Amino acid sequence: MKGFKLSLVVFCVGLLFLSTSVFAQEAVSGEIAVIVKEATSSFWQNVEVGASDAEKELVAQGEQIKVSFLGPAAETKIEEQVNLVENAINRNVLAIVLAPSSPDALVPAVKKANEAGIPVVIVDSLLNYEEGYVSFLATDNRAAGVLCAEELIKRAGTEGKVAVMSYVPGVGSEIGRVGGFIDTIEEKTNMEIVGPFYSQSDMVTALNQTTDVLAANPDLTAIFGANEPTAIGMGRAIEQAGLAGQIVAIGFDGNKDLQEMVRNGTLQGIAVQNPYRMGYDGVKIALAAAKGEEVPKYINTGVVFVTKDNIDSEEAQRVLY
């Protein structure tokens, strides 16, 4: 009888262990939804490359995950992004990596994810709900804006006019980046600031806005384009106006169009983020959080200022895309 009881205990303990093992396996199996501001620009596609590489590595290590990459048609389609997050929650995803298009509009959706027990990792732009996310991965946008202003001042001096071509007002990255730029210009120069103008992250809009600014300000000495589509539109307007090399132009981000503008002298420099790392580290941190592991609250993914002199350097080539 004692032997039977002992066997029964061993069986129950074994069953408990088996159940726990199965539960643990299920806890790290499923979809990690990467939801960005919009899915078409090179910047966000580089986030996708990083997320995909992280998925491949984790699957090779035995993790049973699938990474999905989603984004609205434009950064201004905020409600569409909210719907993507809510749909991910309804699918009971394992975790969400989110680049919020609005610091406030995405808060209710993130709260729903929290209530559903889904960890959220924020990338690129801050969300005004710190307790709602487990980690934040981004460029220090204010520091990047300060860097762009300082590099512009080195080339344009402290007098004259500078135009600020921005993207979507109120977005976390824009507040820090453009704010840091403008504050530095105001603190360190006597330059007159023209703008900011908001392209809504649309290249054609930025081109038209810059064309108008150049026509209305023939004495403009410098100009700053604060994100990828805005800087591309700005650069094309400068080229069309025949002002390449005659006006100090600083851009932001580093796709092939912007690299070519640095090489041909249309832009004197670009501040390049590391979107690959946002996707790569974002997925890995999301999985760790889903497994209940402790993760860092903030990671600065860094920025490199790229000019014609250093564009072929190893440091620059690691972040250009």
Image: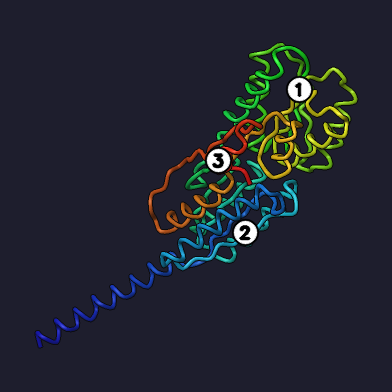
Q: Residue at x 38, y 53 (%)?
A: 293
Dot 1 or dot 2: first in sequence order is: 2
Q: Residue at x 14, y 87 (%)?
A: 4
Q: Nearer the viewer, residue 309 or 196?
A: 309
Amino acid at the residue labelled 1: Ala
User: Which mark is in front, 3 or 1?
Assistant: 1
13 sits left or right of 173 in the view = left
> What number is the disc on residue 69?
2
Instruction: Please report the residue visible at 48 percent of the width from the left and 45 percent of the height from the top.
Output: 135
Q: Residues within 10 Å of mark 3 (few under 14, many from 20)?
A: many
Residue 96 lies left or right of residue 103; in this view the side is left
> In the shown orientation, is residue 246 left or right of residue 180?
right
Kind of residue sitting beneath label 2: Phe
Which amino acid type is shown beneath numbered disc 3? Answer: Ala
Q: Which residue is mark 1?
A: 222
The picture places residue 73, in percent across and down from the top left corner, at 75, 54
- Report helix, strand or loop for mark 1: strand
Q: Residues within 10 Å of mark 2 (few under 14, many from 20)?
A: some
Q: Please determine whether, in this image, residue 9 is positioned above or below residue 185.
A: below
Q: Position of residue 100 (x, y in %)?
A: 63, 46
Dot 1 crowding, Cα within 10 Å, few <14, some 14–19, many 20+? many
Q: CA distance from mark 1 to mark 2?
A: 37 Å
Alpha carbon distance from label 3 to label 1: 27 Å
The quarter of the picture where residue 292 lies is bottom left
Question: In front: 220, or 37?
Answer: 220
| In the depicted structure, whether residue 176 falls above or below residue 25 | above
- Applied colour scheme: rainbow
Kindly check if marks 2 and 3 are in contact, taking CB atoms under 8 A apart as contact.
no
Residue 189 location in percent, x, y?
68, 13
Of residue 111 and residue 81, the one placed in the foreground of this image is 81
Q: Which residue is mark 3?
A: 138
Tell me which label, 2 or 3, sits earlier in the chain: 2
